[in-house]
Amino acid sequence: MKYKVLAVTLTFLFLLSLPLTSASTVEKPYVYVPTVPETSLAVIALYRAGDYAPVLEGCEWLMAIKTPFDSWGRVYGAEHEAKFTGLALMALIRGESIARGRYTETINGAAYWLMFKQKPDGSWEDYLGTAIAVAALEEFINSKYVDPNMPRLRDQAKKAVERGRAWLSLHRPKTDAEFAFGAIALRNRDLAEEMNETAFKYFALSYLGSHPEVPSNYSPKGPLETALLLYATGDERYLKELLSMEHFGFWGTLRYNPVELLEASYVSGFSEMREIACPYLEQIRPQLRFEWERVVYAKYFLSCGMDVELPNESAYSSLKPWQIAEIARIKAILGKPYTREVDYLLNHRNGTGWGDFYNTEYVVWVLHDLNVTLDYSPILDSLEMELTNTSPTYYYAYALIVFKEFGRENALNRTLEILAERESPEGGWGYAPGAPAGIKSTSTVLWGLEEAGLFNTYLHRKGWNFLKRALYVKIPVPERSNGALSVENATLLKIRNGEYAGNASSTVEMDSLDGVVYIYTSKNPLAVGAIPVSGFKAESPWRSEKRQYLILVAIVAALGLSFYGIVLFERGRREGRQ
């Protein structure tokens, strides 16, 4: 886990330091991270659909996020495993058939890694890892890309497959993915037929040569299921949907928590984050035994147009004051009565507030917004006295609003001073003093500044630019001129006659090329794009069974002729003696 966090942090810092080029650029949200299952299966499905440009894009991302051992984890920096290495191997075999010579070394390295990692009992880390490793090595054996300088490698792979199949035959799959790849690894269509009607079942049946009928109302969730259905059906709608899910040349999941992106969407200029985050939020459901979770997620569900379930009044004794105030605020937005919540808060006031600084300021913010009549002066006096630079950063976002609304200039200025002290050199805010700047804390502070009417201040401008750099990236637009293709600060891969024909930097002549793949930037990829020129072409990656059969026939025939020649020779010699 720590390696995953490190990788994301390094990428984030790189984005902040990236110089802008003078060429024309396009700015897009950079809020996804490439994941191996989604990218690999997208490549496999798109290859079968004959859409080769995104196949090369996905393969280049797989090359960018592999380990030095030609193996993969789920994401860059995660522990490498057989299941992910096998999927990447299957994808690269297909990419190699479009750009021969580009992925051969990695393909062989991945196969060797899988064989090296096989356990003595024939398995890999679990059932799914074993099934995918067997399927991938089977494809490797049948491919044209086994290193001829390693003549024993194919035989070693065959033995690994046999041992893996033996282990699988003694164990029972449990999940849809295990059933699907178990059926593929064991070449057992009956095992696939046992499955529920899922995208994995349709994929497995199609891989094994069947033509499954997918219900017209089947709606895939995410790029992985969409890729499985495209492979199974070749349906144009799945092709379009899968391509729409591609981000900078890869397929993956959110780099940030959807809640972080929704917090950013409340800041001016970042509303686009809502459309990105909401589909992921639909997968979150608060646990009913934790009433507070319903309150915390309520505003996010509301932002996404989802149904909101709020706790009953009987649960209020287990909630904090700010949470009851939030229930009143949400009910007001929904047009529902909220007097019981207000009465509860007024009846549970403790002296000059509702407990600590945060609970008190939040309740004051909500009650004032709901036009509740109350002598706020002693409460505000108490808040001013408690205003220190020791609280979590998001406390001060609400303090800005409260002190501004009530004209408490001294307290407002002190709050701004605290935020200025905490702002990082890059412009963002962390959870606490000295903590790394983050999306959620920065977004909350910016929202607070805007709610307090403090637009166009130094704090706001600096924080807003930080958020922009964190969530968006500018990618150069490829430019064509006089038969050349240019992409600044990029490595350009030349593909000619189905072969990888070397690299160029920033500019490449397009004459006689199938197409060009650009990797921007060269050392730390942010985007990969494949641009057809005459069109990418693919050979079959598999050794021809017919050709093998003819070779076998030729060998048998040659042996037969040799044997017949020996017989004739012996007969002639005997006749000569007579």
Image (cartoon, grey):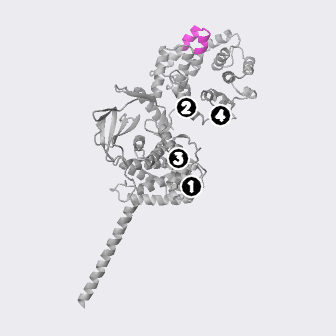
Q: Earlier in the sequence, mark 3 or mark 4?
A: 3
Disc 3 versus disc 1: distance between alpha carbons? 15 Å
Which residue is painted at 57% across and 34% down in the image? Answer: 279
Q: Earlier in the sequence, mark 3 or mark 1?
A: 1
- Residue 515 lies within the magenta run: no
Q: Earlier in the sequence, mark 4 or mark 1?
A: 1
Q: Main secondary structure of the magenta part?
A: helix
> For the residue marked with disc 3, what is the amino acid?
Leu
Q: What amino acid is at disc 2?
A: Ala
Which residue is drawn at the image coordinates 45% and 56% (left, top)?
138
Tell me what residue is drawn at x 47 percent, y 14 percent: 458
Residue type at tag 1: Ala
Residue ID for mark 4: 286
Contact, mark 3 vs mark 2 (Cβ under 8 Å): no
Find the distance from the CA under tag 3 to the CA under tag 4. 30 Å
Residue bearing the label numbered 1: 192
**Callout 2 environment at 10 Å: few (<14), some (14 to 19), or many (20+)?**
many
Q: Give the amino acid type for the residue marked by disc 4 in the picture.
A: Pro
Q: Quadrant of residue 318?
A: top right
Disc 3, SS: helix
Does dot 4 land on a helix, a strand or a loop? loop
Q: How many angstroms separate mark 1 from mark 2 (CA)?
A: 34 Å
Q: Which residue is mark 2?
A: 277
Of labels 3 and 2, earlier in sequence is: 3
Which residue is label 3 attached to?
A: 229
Highlighted magenta segment, given as a residue range: 400-415
For residue 414: magenta? yes
Residue 441 in picture, x, y percent from top left: 54, 24
